[in-house]
Amino acid sequence: MKEEIDARVSELRNAVEQARSMPMSASVMVNRAELLDLVDSLEAAIDAALGEATGVLGDRAAVVAQGQSEADEILRQAHAERDKLVSDTDVYRLGSERAEEITAEARREAQSLRAEAEEYVESRLANFELTLERTLEAVRRGRARLSDDSDVDSLRLPKHLER
C-alpha cells in the first residue's frame, strides 16, 4: 500500500517537474486533466490505505476478543478443577494454589496477547501516519506550485514601461 502511494506521489512530482516552464518565471504549465488524474489516483491509493488501516484495527479487536475468550475458558476450567478438589483439605489447598496459578497464567497470556495486538496496530498506524504525512506534504508542494502559476499575471510590466 505504501509503495502504491509513493509511486503516485512520484508520478505527481514528475508531472510537475517535467512541465513546460513559463518564460522568465519559476512557474510551469501543466496539463490540468493529467494532473487531476494523478491526484485522483493518489486519492484512491490513500483511500485503500485507510481501508487497510481500518482492517488492522478490526484485527486488533478480534485478537483481543480471542485472548479474552481463551482467558475466560482457562478461568472456567480452573474453577471447575478447584470445585472437584474441595472434598479433601490437602487436595483443596493444592487445588486452590493451582487454580491461582492458572488464573495468573491466564491473565498474563491475555495481557501478552493484548500487548502484542496493540504493538502491531501501533506499528501499522505509525507507518500509515508517516505515509500520509509524506503524501500530504507532496500535495501541499504541488498545490503551492500550482498557485505560483496564477502569479504569472502579476509579472507584467507597469504601464509606463510598456511601449
Image (spheres, grey):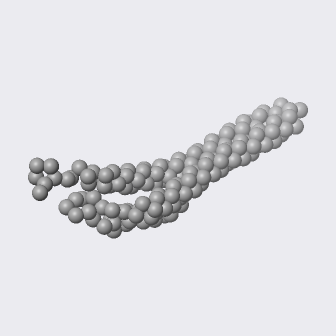
Work out whether residue 25 or residue 97 is closer to the camera in this orientation and state it.
25
Residue visible at 81% across and 36% down in the picture = 79
Q: Position of residue 55 (x, y in %)?
A: 63, 51
Whether residue 33 sits left or right of residue 91 in the image: it is left
Work out whether residue 45 or residue 37 is closer to the camera in this orientation and state it.
37
Q: Is residue 19 visible?
A: yes
Residue visible at 46% across and 62% down in the picture = 33
Relative to 2, is 94 above or below? Answer: above
Q: Position of residue 39 (x, y in %)?
A: 47, 58
Residue visible at 81% across and 39% down in the picture = 76
Count of labels in the image: 0
Work out whether residue 139 or residue 148 is closer to the camera in this orientation and state it.
148
Residue visible at 65% across and 48% down in the picture = 58
Work out whether residue 76 or residue 30 is closer to the camera in this orientation and state it.
30
Q: Position of residue 127 (x, y in %)?
A: 48, 53
> From the image, which quarter does the C terminus lie in?
bottom left
